[in-house]
Structures are given as C-alpha cells and as structure tokens.
Amino acid sequence: MEAQLKELIPFLRDKNPQVRQIALSNLLGQTPEGSPHRNIFYHGLGATGLQKPKETDIIRDLKLLCRDQLAVAHDAFRALVNLSDSPLLVPFLSEPAFLTFLVSYILNADSILADLASMLLSNLTASSSPCAALLALNVPILKTPSSPSSFFPTLARSGTCFAPVPYPPGEPQDILALPLLIDAFVEGASMDPSGDRASRKRKGELHFLASVFANISTSPAGRTFFITSRPTDPLNPNSTNEYPLAKIVAFTEHQDTIRRGGVASTLKNCVFSSQVHRAILSPDTETVVVPPSTLSAPGIDALPYILLPLAGPEELDLEDQEKLPSALQFLPSTKKRDPDPVLRLTHVETLLLLCTTRWGRDYLRDHGVYEIVRGAHMEETVDKVSEHIERLVQLLKGDESVETVDGCDVVRVGDQDDDDDDEDNRIEEV
C-alpha cells in the first residue's frame, strides 16, 4: 500500500487539475495523526550529519497546491493542517515566502479558504520560531478604498483568491502583518443580522486567529506587542492610538469556543506583567502609559469581559449592583456562565494575577469582583475552579498589612499550571 501511495506523489505536479485532485484526495487520508502510512510525508525531512534538513518534493508540492483551484487547494490546506503537528515540518511551513503567502491569504477578505489557512497558522505558532517570525513579518499591500477591507495583499493571489479588477495602481507598501490580522479577526466575527453569509464583509470567520494570538502572547515580545500603544488604523499612522489587546477583549463572550478561549488566554498571558494592570483595568475614558513606551492610549477596560463569563443570573442587592461595571448590572434571568470549565478557570487565574498588586486588589474590590465570584463559587461543579476562586476570595477579603499600604507590593498567587494553556496550543486536525 505504501509503495502505491508513493507512486501518486509525482501526479501532484500533473498539468491536468483533475489528476492533481485525484492524487491529492487519495493521499489526504494518510495525513491525520495515527494514519498507517503517514511517514511518506516526513521521509527525508530529517537532518543527516552536519547537513541541514532539506524540503522534500511532496511538502513543496503541497505548499504550491494551496494556490491551486478550489478543490485542490482545499485538500492541500487540510493536508498541511494535519501534518503541521510535526516539528520536522515547521521550518518549511514557516519559511518567509510561504508564511507571507499564508498571512496575505488570510488577510484578503475574498479568500474562500481563509479559515483553513488560519488553522494552519494556529498550528504553526504552537512553536516559538514561527511566533517570532510572525511578530516581525511585513506583508506588501495595495490600498483599494472600494474593496471590503480597503487593501489588497498582493501575495495572496491564487486560484481561490483573485486580484481586484481593475487592479489598484501604485507601488505596494510593506505593512506590519499582526495589526492587520487583528483587524481581520474582528471583522470575521461580524455577522449580518439576517444571517446571510453572502453579505459578510469577509468570507472567513477566522476564529482560529484567537489561538494564534494566544500562542504569540506566551513570549515576552508577544505580550509587549499587545500592550504597546499603536495607531488604531494600521494603514493610517496618524489615527488615534489604541492598545491592540483592546480590540479583541470583547470576544470572551463569543459563541465560538475557539475564539473566546484564545482571547481569554491572550488576556491572561498579558497580565503576567504587573506593569500593564492599570492599562488593562482602567476604563477607556482614561489614558494610560505602559512602560517602557511613552505613548499613551485609552484604558482597555477589560474587567467586564473577564467577569461576564463568570456571571450568572443571581440577583444582587442594589448596593452591590452599584459596585459592578455597567455591563454587569441587572443581568437578565437568562444569563449563563461559560459552559467550558477550562475557560472559567482561565478567567479566575486572570483575576488572581491582577491581585498581585495592591492597586489591582483595590480596583477589583471596588468594582464588585467578590460579589460575582461568590455567585460563581456557589454554582461551580469543578473542584479545581472552586479552589482557585477560594484563593481569589482570600486575596480580596483578606486584611492588607501595613507594608502593602503604599501600593508597591507584589503578591505571588502560586504557580500557574502549564496544562491550562493546552487548549490553545494544541494542534488541530481536519
């Protein structure tokens, strides 16, 4: 059987698209983890002696087929999503040319397979080197005011992503990719009230970009990006400043588990630095500077989006209601907590990290965090989440010692379990 499958590999380069499709569809079934003949895709990728590993024909062909017509490109993306769990493949899928194509393809609003491309990028960023490459990546774009996204990434052109007609004039300009990906992620969540997918601004929902952001924010450089003030419009340097994290925090209540989970993990990763707590908690009516940057931007006002997934329909006294952020006051009787215990735990851990400074603890006390987590604890059925809520309550209700009155203290909240981020760093298969 393996010999027969290997005989199909040369047909991936056949001039006839139907032949390419048949060959690829027969190989696709061997790409998921555990497939009996999966090794045919990795054969020859390992380094020998002092020589660097070289890209094999089949991997190069799959990368090229991502630019093919719809049926072929769909299967090529699926194959690479499934195969990208191997460290052997990561260097070849994160090399500059393919990474630039992948990101450009996701950025184009008309890309039919943008969701599969986002899954592939999510899997790749589970490794540190693609994260570093993506943080520094620039993509060439042409401004197109008439198009849905107001720009065309020139390297996105393929059989499932056509160039605009008429083609935009002028020379392409290189723009940092990550701010553009954040805007695309936000646009991907917007739905037409009628539910008509044809009227969407983007063909892809791009939920898996949330996992990309979570993976990137595990590094200090990634966290710095999300909490460094930059222009709201990546194409207009003179636009008002905003923290990139502020654009995505609202999705902690989104119906898609991948989207809200990735955003929750990104937020948690960003609060590991106590220097950013003021910017993350302050309302958007206040401007805040996060060192070492000297640029200010409106506060991220993240507390409502941390508490809403933990809030239920419980009625509170008027005095307690007044403490809460406005988004949590007088919630309807139909309000439900996040059904995923991993995500509930993530939000509680975020609150614990925000308690590491006296200023953070005081802010949480003054804005009704105890009242919300008290109700959450009463309904919680998972021991680990309950234990973390109890630790949070101890910090919120405990007496402050004299040494902490100056607000310069740092409290350790215990080791964070690495398993909690597995949901975001896992490799997706299709």
Image: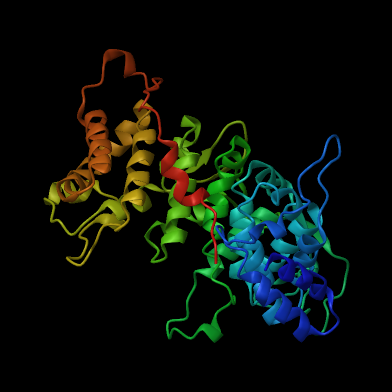
In this rendering, the answer to whether 16 lies above or below 214 is: below
Looking at the picture, how far across and down is residue 250, in whole percent?
Answer: 43, 58
Q: Please name the residue shown 38% across and 28% down the image.
A: 356
Quadrant of the drawing holding the N terminus: bottom right
Left or right: 274 as drawn, with respect to 412: right
| Residue 182 found in image quarter | bottom right
Looking at the picture, how far across and down is residue 385, in whole percent?
Answer: 27, 43
Quadrant of the drawing holding the C terminus: bottom right
In this rendering, the answer to whether 185 lies above or below 193 is: above
Left or right: 246 as drawn, with respect to 378: right
In this rendering, the answer to whether 68 lies above or below 353 is: below
Q: Please name the residue shown 38% across and 40% down the image.
A: 350
Q: Does residue 5 show up?
A: yes
Looking at the picture, how far across and down is residue 91, in whole percent?
Answer: 74, 48
| Residue 220 found in image quarter | top right
Q: Please name the residue shown 36% across and 27% down the image.
A: 414
Q: Does residue 164 show up?
A: no
